[in-house]
Amino acid sequence: MFGIRQCRPASVLGVGLAVALLAACSGGGSGHSNASAGTTSTASGGSSTRPNIVFVLTDDLSWNLVQYMPHVKELQKDGTTFSNYYVTDSLCCPSRSSILTGEFPHNTGVFTNNGDDGGYASFNRNGDEKKCYAPAMQKAGYRTGFMGKYLNGYLPADKNGTSAPYVPPGWNTWDAAGNGYPEFNYALNENGKVVHYGHDPKDYLTDVVAGKARAFIDSAATNKKPFMLELATFAPHAPSTPAPRDARSFPGLRAPRTPAYNTPSTPTPKWQSGLAPLSSEEQTSIDQKFAKRVRSVQAVDDMIAGVRSELESKGLARNTYIVFSSDNGFHMGEHRLRPGKQTAYDTDIKVPLVVAGPGVPAGHTVSQLAENIDLSPTFQDLSGAGAPTTADGRSLAPLLRGQSPTGWRQAVLIEHHHPVSKTDDPDAAPDNSGNPPTYEAIRTANALWVEYADGEREYYGTTADPNELQNKAASLSAARRDALHATLTAMQHCSGTVSCEKASALQPTAGR
């Protein structure tokens, strides 16, 4: 077992980050558990009784990385973990579009990272920016901030530099990066001005975002106005560039060998039938890539510690929700699939969601089905603006208060279009690596049902088969297959909270 880095000497950190981490590691962060005290009373740093929200959204972060993030584990102790939280599509742009709007891909119109049915161009063309949580919260009196990765296809300025840098509506502070998944040599659109960064350690993007986040918090403490801040990292997305201080950490680390590692489902789905067993070279490459992923999230973990310490020092911690999540998971050898995402398996669709804040029980786990379409309604609900009924998701606020609402959804929907192959899309892997064809799927508390556009079906009973290796689709009764299909069909045509919650009710025999 490899040790998990806890705290590091200031000599390997930037001065500001070192001070923040020193406070967190020496006990300055111990007061964070007070966030579960059930109060939204005013802290010394502000006059508003409405809570602040800091949302940390990572890229391609799977559950198996959390064990290497001590400050996320601390957040779990201080708050609530959602054990059954899923994404609408295990691909960057569709998932982030659902997070921002609270809508399924069939309502945002964003199914891929580019082309006619994806990317920022589709998001903007479909009017989705107006449906984001930021304009609503800004209208409700919140100061809003966005820092880091926005949507695939968004550029800080257009390619020839002739157009004014664009800032979407609803954001008071905007520090967004473009494409390419850089951590060095990138540009940020800083409130309408393009600023270029170099290759010095101080230019490392995750650290730059962390510094801007602390400055935003300092300013918020001064103007005494509630705020919503999204911090969207590129890490740990490939190439998984770590901060220079972490480049040599975790030597010899290997990727997890779960029962699904290098093991196909039985019977093997047609779209995986051509996959050979992983070679020794491929397994070595997977181990190396996994270690890089672990190294790259250390700076994200540092950022969380620094943000929490800054909130504490400014008297805002007791009245601030910290939300940690990912846009999708990532498989690395499971089902013999080469590193990637886009499948309906839990490795790709089931991701962390951890929340600490006022009224949130400490060390608690929520087992109800939740999905990324719930985040926008939740943020708006917590702000007092109210969860919009036009969103497909619903507010998680009752679950964050330890309540168990009746009539909660019984299934979540996953929608995926086979992506357009583009050389400039890092997620467009060659077909022979195991990218699935177009599909629709539902995940229930104990099963996964997938319908592919070519007519193939997959079904896994996840209670007895958590690694999703025994495909039971062919052995299901006709009645059960029809019931699952009816639920899936209803969900892929729903619109709005009431419609989608009604659609998620499993048809008779579907849940057995």
Image (cartoon, rainbow, N blue to C red):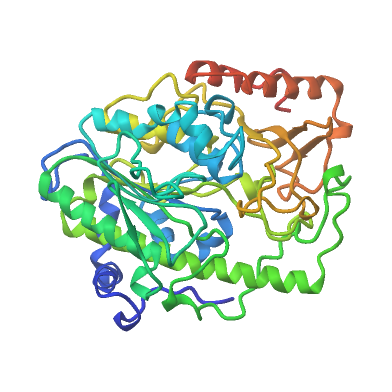
Quarter of the image where the N terminus is located: bottom right
Q: Nearer the viewer, residue 188 or 279?
A: 188
Residue 398 visible in image: no
Q: Nearer the viewer, residue 206 or 488?
A: 206
- 236 left or right, relative to 397: right
How many numbered badges does the structure rendering display?
Answer: 0
- Tell me what residue is drawn at x 88 percent, y 33 percent: 474
The location of residue 231, given as percent across then percent down, is 37, 51
Residue 280 found in image quarter = bottom right
The location of residue 178, given as percent across then percent down, is 45, 52
The location of residue 386, given as percent across then percent down, is 32, 24
Residue 471 found in image quarter = top right
Residue 284 visible in image: yes
Q: Nearer the viewer, residue 190 or 279?
A: 190
Residue lying at the far bottom in this picture: please name it: 11
- Up/down of 317 relative to 405, above or below: below
- Tell me what residue is drawn at x 50 percent, y 39 percent: 120
- 4 left or right, relative to 280: left
- Tell me what residue is drawn at x 49 percent, y 29 percent: 125
The location of residue 317, given as percent across then percent down, is 23, 51
Quarter of the image where the C terminus is located: top right
- Up/down of 131 relative to 472, above or below: above
- Up/down of 76 relative to 450, above or below: below
